[in-house]
Image: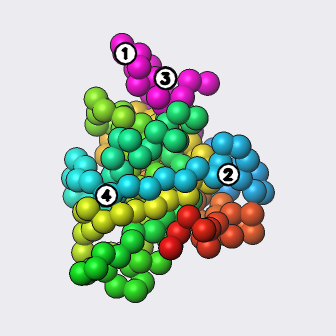
Amino acid sequence: MSTAQEIAQLPQRPEAPQQTSQFRLSRPQIVGPDAPESPFPILLSGPVQKGFGRGSKDLGCPTANLPDESFTPMSSVTKTGIYYGYAQVLPQTESKLSAEDIKVHPMVMSLGWNPHYNNEKLTAEIHIMHDFASDFYGYEMKAVVLGYIRPELRYTSREALIDDIEVDKQVALNSLDRPGYSKFSEDAHFN
C-alpha cells in the first residue's frame, strides 16, 4: 500500500477506480474492527482554510479544509480515501459560533485528489456532521481520525458522487456508534 504522501511524490498519480452501481450495492453499513487499530487514532489540527468552494455549492456537503502541513501525520501513514472520526471547531474570543457549534461532532474526511474534479493538489477536507449557522474560516479545528471507509473513486456523474457521500455519512455514524469509537468524542485532544 502506498501512502498518500508517497503517491504525492510520483510524477503521475495512479488512476482512481471507477465507481460502479455494484460497488454501492455491496458497501457495508459499518466499517472497521470494534475499536480503532493502528495507525488510528490519528490526531489532526490546524486553522480552517478556504478550499475550492464545491462542498456546499456543488455537493450540498460543506467541508473545512486543513492546511497542508497539518495533515502530514495522516498522509504519511494512510492511503487516500474517505475516513471517519470526530471533529471540533474551537471558539475564538469574538466567536460567532454557538455553544452547539463548538461541541465535538462526528465527521467524514476526504484525503486525496478528488478524482471527480481532477485536483492537482493533495487535500484534507472534513465534513462535520452538524449544521453551522455561519462559516468558520481561520478558526482552529481539531480532528481525531478513527477509521477508513473506502477508496477515492472516479464518478460518472455528480449525482453518483452525492449518493456515495450520503452513504459515507451513514457508514460513519453507524461505525462511530460503537463503544470503542464513541469514547473518542471525549478525547483529551478536544477542548
Name the side, left or right, on which 59 lies relative to 183: left
Mark pair 2, 1: CA separation: 30 Å
For residue 126, above or below residue 113: below
Q: Earlier in the sequence, mark 4 or mark 1?
A: 1
Please provide percent x and percent y for residue 86: 54, 64
**Magenta stretch in the rendered image:** 1-24
Per the picture, the main secondary structure of the magenta-coloured stretch is loop
Mark pair 1, 3: CA separation: 11 Å
Mark pair 2, 3: CA separation: 25 Å
Residue that appears at 33% across and 47% down: 67
Instruction: Name the residue tied to disc 4.
Output: 48
Q: Nearer the viewer, mark 2 or mark 3?
A: 3
Instruction: Name the residue tied to disc 3.
Output: 6
Residue 22 magenta-highlighted: yes
Instruction: Name the residue tied to disc 2.
Output: 31
Q: Earlier in the sequence, mark 2 or mark 3?
A: 3
Please provide percent x and percent y for residue 109: 46, 51
